[in-house]
Amino acid sequence: MTDFAQIRQLVGLRQAAEMYGLEVNSFGSARCVFHGDSHPSMRLYDDHFHCYACGAHGDVTDLTAQMFGLSKSDAADKLCGDFGITANKSPPVVQRKRELTSREKSQFALDILTDYVVMLRHFREHYAPFSFDTELSPQFTESLQNLDYAEYLWDAWFDSTEDERAVFFTENIEQFRRYYASLVKYGFIRPSLA
Ligand SMILES: [Zn+2]
């Protein structure tokens, strides 16, 4: 049985994408391989991708499968071969729940803020009322209430050191929980966070 989680840990998605010939710009985005994409709508993260145009998301094995027209397990074999991974044949060890590392906290903070800001900007643009007497949609209202602050937190993340980012995540955990819940509610969430 193929251990997709092990591959996710050992192969950087962006590194694999570039090695397989996907053109990734300096923002970490590429033209989506799941739909006819004329602009780079697909965002590549360390362990997953998300296309903001067609909603495709998944991990490095999903991406490889799509790029080469392979089944998921054949794509996993290809990754193991190309990246020199010895497949783990032993049954998966049940992992104890553990405290997140500073790096993981920092990454979560960035992932959630990025998705949330992108979602609210989308709501601001696409859910705006047509006239003064149209009732405001919940999506537009949420963008009015939260977009400025979420953008402020997003900027703060980029202005912080790695250690500060972990503290920042812990200190604003309630905020992140709310953002996360909203991303789940509107289906904007990526599987690695779910
Ligand atoms: Zn797409």
Image: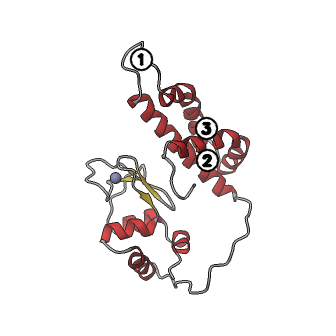
Amino acid marked by disc 1: Thr
**Distance Cα–Cα, label 3 vs label 2:** 11 Å
Dot 3 or dot 2, earlier in sequence: 2
Lateral position of residue 54 relative to residue 76, left or right: left
Which residue is label 2 attached to?
109
Near-viewer residue (18 or 113)? 113
Q: Amino acid at mark 2?
A: Ala
Where is the C terminus found, in terms of image quarters? bottom right
The residue pinned by badge 1 equals: 134
Classify mark 2: helix, strand or loop.
helix
- Crowd around label 1: few <14 · some 14–19 · many ≥20 (10 Å): few
- Determine the residue positioned at 60% across, 51% down: 108
Tell me where residue 137 appears, x and y as whole percent.
47, 26
Rendering coords of residue 126 (x, y %): 38, 31
Vertical placement of residue 172 versus 129, above or below: below
Q: Which residue is mark 3?
A: 156
> Mark 3: which amino acid?
Ala
Left or right of residue 2: residue 62: left
Q: Quadrant of residue 62?
A: bottom left
